[in-house]
Image: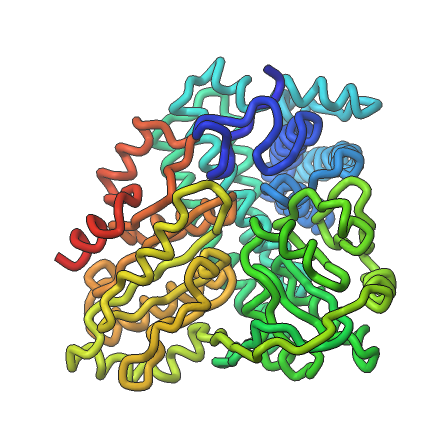
Amino acid sequence: MSMYCYQCEQTAMGTGCTVRGVCGKDETTATLQDLLVYASKGISMYANRARKLGAVNNEVDAFLIEALFTTVTNVDFDPARIESFLKKAGEIKNKAKAMYEAAAAAKGQTPETLSGPAAWAPAADIDGLVAQGREVGVLSRKSTLGDDITGLIELVTYGLKGTAAYADHARVLGKESDEVYATFHEALDFLTTPSPSIDDLLGWSLKVGELNLTVMGLLDTANTGAFGDPVPTAVRIEPVKGKAIVVSGHDLKDLKMLLEQTEGKGINIYTHGEMLPAHGYPELKKHSHLVGNYGGAWQDQAKEFDAFPGAILMTTNCIQKPRETYSDRIFTTGLVAWPGVTHIGCKKDFTPVIEAALAAPGFTQDGSGKTIMVGFGHNAVMNIAGPVIDAVRAGAIKHFFLIGGCDGAKPGRNYFTDFAQAVPKDCVILTLACGKYRFNKLDFGDIGGIPRLLDIGQCNDAYSAIQIAVALANAFGIGVNDLPLSMILSWYEQKAVAILLTLLHLGIKNIKLGPSLPAFVTPAALNVLVDKFNIAPTTTVEQDLKEILG
């Protein structure tokens, strides 16, 4: 068995994908991604030491973030692109090594002779790289360190991957942090420790949660700085007659550039998946040809894109294997890639996307005009904080439920739909990420004019949810764990892991996590989390609601 991957919720049999990833990646792609993570550790071994001597290099820092993001589930399925990343990783590692050695010499010190990932050099061809990757994957750690330690190493690693995705989104909007880069390097350097302890690994898990909180704050500042604070907005979910492009993923800057390039061309732009919250941003919604949202969460894209009569642009994760019926009208950009799919490079010239949209039939008639509401970020919710607090004090609002997270295709996720529908009518539901598609088109009504369903935004807008929770706790003079607030979270990939670690870093307890617990978190590690944070798997809607509401 040369492939072994258990980093996402859908992993085969709940234990690990060994032949082909449930996500669609093959053994070559999976193994090259393992090697890219290993190479990233080597870069950080030098960069961490150099930084402690006062030497930094932004090219090294930025590459590390992109390399980790490339290995997140449903991002890059193209072995040729990952091969180019690995060749670049060799160059970047040498640059980091030279920087460290020069910094040591300047301080009159003898640099360490480092081994392991620091001594890695890329093989000459893809076959050689795959052979290298087979030596450094999860199985190599399980055989030497055991399941418990390996699982906790992966918990830290996956948290770093998810955080890197958010850091990359912030970076493309001009927001970076030297403190953030320093922690990334320190964490990856730590992961090369020959025999890390459970206590140290759990400590680093919470440090990664703290890091992710900082990065989500950076991204929030980047998004609101570039596009304004989200405002409550009605979004059309039925088509408008005319030519069409649908944009999926998370990258708001890509959407902005596409809107600008399609201005006046008679093409309507639709969001999909995690792009839905874009409609709440003033600088995006001002474009009149951003007409609505099409479809739902990422796992339904094959069916939905097949039926879409226009061009498709994937900006980040999550991409699935395209059907032949639309393979000539789907495009990728940024770090997302699929073999054979046309990739729009860093110059962001979306002409091929526009031409494909004009060549396609488009929608031949208008839909019904049905809408849903988005745009309840922390700024918008704080604007109605007074009425919300009054409603709680008056007993009109009894409880808040945060129901959301990453969606997926594995059976059992109807739990989240059923749970939302079962929430009593005197309770408010906060939601975010693509998990909301399980119920966001249902009518939940309002409580005294306050909508019962508040869509906070993308997965990274967990930052907004945290700000809302802290503000409510402060208003009532209590701790967050004492609020009438329960978190019912669905997870799928590494960004969800990063957010979970952030919540644990903040000391938030009693989280319900589903539809299944991570395969990489062994019973021994889970017991620690249960003892410290009372984190628990979702059970049944009836049992969980009874436990929460008494």
Considering the image in quadrants, where does the N terminus appear?
top right
Left or right of residue 353: residue 498: left
Q: Name the residue located 50 percent from the left edge and 46 percent from the top edge.
A: 408
Q: Is residue 58 visible?
A: yes
Please say which color scheme the image uses.
rainbow
Identified at 71% across, 33% down, the residue is: 97
Residue 537: horizontal and vertical position, in percent?
30, 42
Q: Is residue 154 above or below residue 166?
A: above
In the rendered image, is residue 55 in sight?
Answer: no
Q: Farthest residue to the front: give it.
A: 365
Task: Name the quarter where the C terminus is drawn.
Answer: bottom left
Is 538 or 51 nearer to us in this picture? 538
Q: In the figure, 167 relative to 156: above or below? A: below
Residue 167 place in picture, x, y as percent: 59, 54
Q: Is residue 266 found left or right of 423 in the rendered image?
A: right
Please tell me in which quadrant of the rendered image residue 4 appears: top right
The residue furthest left is: 550
Q: Nearer the viewer, residue 531 or 210?
A: 531
Give coordinates of residue 224: x percent, y percent.
56, 74
The residue closer to the viewer here, 137 or 202, is 137
Answer with left or right where residue 480 lies relative to residue 317: left
Which quadrant of the figure has residue 518? Answer: top left
Query: In front here: 262 or 534?
Result: 262
- Tell me the residue at 48%/63% (across/down): 461
Q: Residue at x 48, y 14 (%)?
A: 144
Residue 310 in the image: state x and y as whole percent.
76, 64
